[in-house]
Amino acid sequence: MEAIMKRWLRAVLATAALGGAAGALALQVVDDRGVAVQFERSPQRIVSVLPSLTETVCALGQCQRLVGVDRYSNFPDSVRSLPQVGGGIDPNIEAIVALKPDVVLMATSARGAERLQSMGIKVLALEPMSHADVRRVLDRVGELLQVNDAQQVWRVIDASVRAAAQSLPPKARGARVYFEVNSGPYAAGEASFIGETLSRLQVRNIVPAALGPFPKLNPEFVVRANPDVIMVGDRNFTGMDARPGWAGMRAMQTKRVCIFSAEQSDTLVRPGPRMAEGARIMARCLSDRLG
Amino acid sequence: MRVVVALGGGLLAASVLLALLGTGVGSSGLESLTQVWRDPTAAQIVWDIRLPRTLGAWGAGALLGLAGAVAQGLFRNPLADPYLLGSASGSSLGVALALALFGASPFATHWLVRLGLTGAAFLGAVGAVLLTLILARGVQHTLRLLLAGVIVGVVLGALVSLTMQVVPDVMQAMQAFMLGSTGFVGWSACLLMALVWLLCMLAAWMLSPVLDGLSLGEATAISLGLPLPQLRAALIAVLALATGTAVAQTGLIAFVGLAAPHLVRSVAKTTHGNLILLSSLMGGVLLMAADILARWLIAPQELPVGVLTAVLGGGYLLWLMHRGPTMPTRGTV
């Protein structure tokens, strides 16, 4: 808490000091590291090395400013033709520098930020993890791109999630869901981004928030919880019925299993502007299986 | 000899006690077994999940302990472990490719579903050992075998990393495999491991005089009239089969194969026949204990069992090492 206060204080002080300098700088954005990044004008050449940030830029209607993306960014289609500059954990510094970006958008946890900054490239580090983060990141990137409708974009997303929740048949409300992230088995708990979406859909998660966002569960916990619906990516569904005791679970016997394609999984797990689409995918499956 | 019998008896008793304890430790920590007779779900959980999982942990540990003792005797090297000939990275590559190819084409998917991840891991492990043998041009030359094993391990490991880089979706599943897990061991896997264990134990027992001969040096072993190349090949087959089976069912469990023979030697100095049997029991006890702790400590979450085997086995070995002059040396092998 204290660290956050200090960070804010620093940001406020920095802003005040800059304000005192007679507004020589047109634009300043504070990122998730607490660093105030200054720009003379809104960046026109952007490299994004996080898929959700790529999607955020495009959701704000500024896709054309992207000049490079990471190898995992695959939405919208237009970014697939852009030069790829590695991934979040192994960004290709040389390729990024060669693109002469005005700013590089990356996750706080990504590597290479110091290296890029030492070569005079501006880095804005943002880490979207939750629904609230999606809104905050939209705001920050909106400031950066100097577009005014970030709040409007958020309102549409929020309303769409609500609409998805309302589209559910009454029977689906309160259904108990197990969302498997991978066959560890790692689950998406209430505290995760996916868990938040499930809560908004008014279904119950068998993995309580106390276990953290993505706990590695004892498989027998799932068998005992006996969820009404299982949600899983097609990659991890293979062999699920061969796990000891799983075939007898209610969801498996009544075939109430939502199996998501790789593309759908991307939409579901990325904390970005497509979260409403993710909510719709889940709602559609819940309606099909429980309606 | 009395020590050997006492240790064997002690390990068997520990196995039985741990197995009983293991049936009572589940997703809510230590729980009473009384409700098994009333609640069908609880009964199913104990009989179909917990019991095979506990026994399966013992089986995999026993296979690794056996393989470790064989490897250390065969290479006359106290640092040898079951993964020495590349089976670890081989099985990782098998699993990584299976995960990556899954969904890539209907044909690949069809075959992968039939083969399963355990099949892919087993084929990978055995394939890597064969590759090592080919690169070493046979089994005669110990150093060449070791080097070939290291090379195969490094190259296949690099291919695993490359696969994860290209298909990042498999990364988390791979991590789970590399840390090892006993969570999905069912009765069929238990049965398979038990059969392979019997087969390997029998073969290793019959071949153990070769290891005793080898511990005096290759020249001595040959002068004793042992047909070394054939017997070595047979021992490597035992090593590959035991390791491959364990890895296929439970992933890469760290340290059991390396530590188990040392733990046995620190208590009893004996012939290889006994050492292999005792190491196997020790490996079983070690992994079963680690599995129980893994699901107990932060239930209903699980710790990766490989982390616990490393901490438990490593900690105990370290303690033994500094306790006194009983540190196992090559001369006592």
Image (spheres, coloured by chain):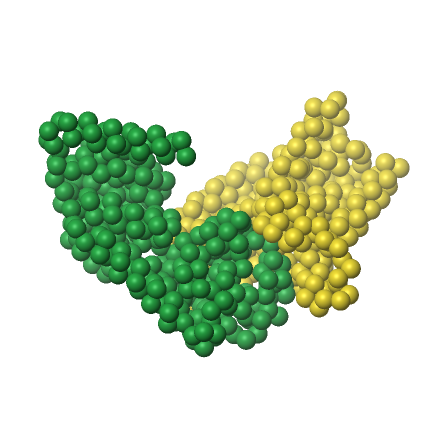
Chain colours: A green, B yellow
Q: Could you say which is closer to the camera, residue A161 or residue A31? A: A161
- The percent position of residue A22, horizontal first and vertical second, equals 10, 29
- The percent position of residue A237, horizontal first and vertical second, equals 49, 65
Q: Quadrant of the C terminus of chain A?
A: bottom left
Q: Quadrant of the N terminus of chain A?
A: top left
Can residue B45 be seen here? Answer: yes
> Residue placed at 15% from the left, 46% from the top?
A146
> Residue placed at 40% from the left, 68% from the top?
A283
Q: Tell which residue pokes out farthest to the right in this image.
A: B2
The answer to which image quadrant residue A4 occupies is: top left
Q: Could you say which is closer to the camera, residue B168 or residue A36? A: A36
Can residue A122 be seen here? Answer: no
> Residue placed at 59% from the left, 65% from the top?
A226
Q: Is residue B218 left or right of residue B248?
A: right
- The percent position of residue A76, horizontal first and vertical second, equals 24, 59
Q: Tell which residue pokes out farthest to the bottom in this image.
A: A291
Q: Is residue B66 left or right of residue A259?
A: right
- The percent position of residue B95, horizontal first and vertical second, equals 50, 55
Q: Could you say which is closer to the camera, residue A213 or residue A260? A: A213
Query: Total marks drawn?
Result: 0
> Residue placed at 86% from the left, 41% from the top?
B5
Q: Could you say which is closer to the camera, residue B242 or residue A107? A: A107
